[in-house]
Amino acid sequence: MAGLIVLLAVGALLALAAAADTGVRLLRNYRLAKTIGAPIRIVPISPLNPFWVLLDRKVLPLLRRLPFGDNSFTRYNWRGWEVEDRWRSHYEMGDIWVLVTPFKNWVYVNDPDALMSVFRRGNEITRPVVVTAEGERWKTQRRILTHCFNEANNKIVWSEVITLAGDMLQYWSTKASIRSSADDLRTLSLHVLSRAAFGKSFPFEGADNRDHSATLGTKALAWPWPFRKLRSVYAAWVNFHDYMTGMYEEGKRAAAAGKAADDHNLLSLMVRASQADPQSLTESEIYGNMFAVSFAGHDTTSNTLTFALHFLAAHPGVQDWLTEEAADVFGERGPEEWDYRADFPRLKRCLAVMYETMRLYTPVPVLKWTADRSQPVTVHDRTYLLPPHSMIAPSYGAIQTDPRFWGSDSLAWWPSRWIKKTSSSSNEEEFHMPPRGAFLAWSEGTRDCVGRKFSQVEFVATMAALFRRWRVDLVVSPKETLDAARRRVGRLTKTDSYAVLLLQMLHPERAPLVWRRA
């Protein structure tokens, strides 16, 4: 009994110490936030607290049912709240406001001009993540990586997607309904990345015919965790690292032997650059960049494709719109005759579907921070001085749906908003962009996404291959109409979207799809 009492006392003291430390940090950050002069909201737990991350989605729905349940804690204290909130907070508080947490102060900005200024000042206002290099080394890596993401590599992406998407469609057409769309799209994206990044092609396999594995992990996952999934992730990471090491050594041997470089995959291009100039990229820098490319280029595009397919299933008119464009572009040519350089620029409607989906559901919002110096940020006609170590959060959920920039239907998924018609033919349409800073899905400035075109080619080729001669619809339950089913999936995309590592639909299998010939 005495031992139990001691244990409880120690636990209570630790809890009090943690509460006191949180209180001190919160007070310090509140005082710093006051110096900015912008509206403030306070939450007592950081949304990034690892223990809270495990509980937020379970606890917050219960708290919202209590009296006074609509408060700053329930509104802002979970990952991905920005997607649900949209522009509501900014309309209440203005185009800049501060969320005070025990970890950092988060400065939310909803002004296009201010955001473009933040993105252009990449040397002063940086990303709060560990990167492979900064300064001149970062510039060198960025220059080489930009050179590797070239048109020859995009052509590889185009060809690989058309082949894989055709195989995926063939697999889907044999099923009465498809609940594995997200998994299958992830497979497609992974295989495209394998070919374009590493030079290795793999045939498409549907979810029923393959083993599930991951490609990410850290040494921490090697610990004896009781969870089998974590151990599997670590094993997958080891396999991925060994595979990349083998590919790197193979590329070095080919370069040393003077073999003709006829493949423009990313890894071989990086190896050639490092062999031509040893000061350009080190082995560890190649590994770091390839890992970043693998992570950024895999789930981001597949998650966007998953959202897009469910939106399209709920909007059959948009499918007809895509098919009309594909008919204008391809005529009677089969997929084996589709040409990247001639055809991709003409598929503006397919690209509009991607932009509209990412407008509402940006998979990887980019954060900035002031590092160890105060930084001025001008919003409209007023300049705010942000203290050191302040997080700057471009308000993607707000600025990409703000009616000031997108009209009264800004929350509706409507890809045609990106198309400016010049005639009745899709061949004479123009792509319409909003004001700079109102759409940030690939970031902006000197550190924007180097794989932007890569992802666009992958997405557009997938749309063209799927909707050239096919249609997708929702599985309708016996108790609902087709229109009711379409409204149901619309609600699902809103209520079932959550930031895990990336923003994604958590349960797309709850809205199974069915494919049919057009």
Image: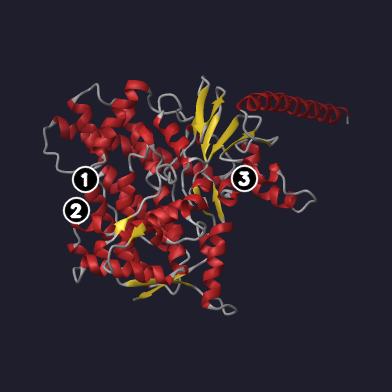
What colouring style does the render use? secondary structure
Q: Is residue 356 above or below residue 374?
A: below
Front of the two marks 3 and 1:
3
Q: Position of residue 178 (x, y in %)?
A: 45, 68
Circle 2: residue type? Arg
Q: Is residue 471 above or below residue 229?
A: below
Circle 1: residue type? Glu
Secondary structure, mark 3, is: helix
In this view, the residue farthest toward the front is 381
**Along the line of sight, the residue nearer the viewer: 34 or 79:** 34
Q: Which residue is mark 3?
A: 89
299 on left or right of 27:
left
Circle 3: residue type? Ser
Q: Residue at x 44, y 52 (%)?
A: 358
| Residue 488, label in figure | none
Between the C-alphas of marks 3 and 1, the distance is 42 Å
Q: Position of residue 364 (x, y in %)?
A: 46, 43
Q: Residues within 10 Å of mark 1 (few under 14, many from 20)?
A: some
Q: Which residue is mark 2?
A: 341
Between the C-alphas of marks 2 and 3, the distance is 44 Å
Quarter of the image where one finds residue 335: bottom left
Q: Residue at x 81, y 29 (%)?
A: 12
Secondary structure, mark 2, is: helix
Q: Position of residue 371 (x, y in %)?
A: 50, 23
Secondary structure, mark 1, is: helix
Q: Which residue is mark 1?
A: 151
Do the CB atoms of the residues marked 1 and 2 lie less than 8 Å apart? yes
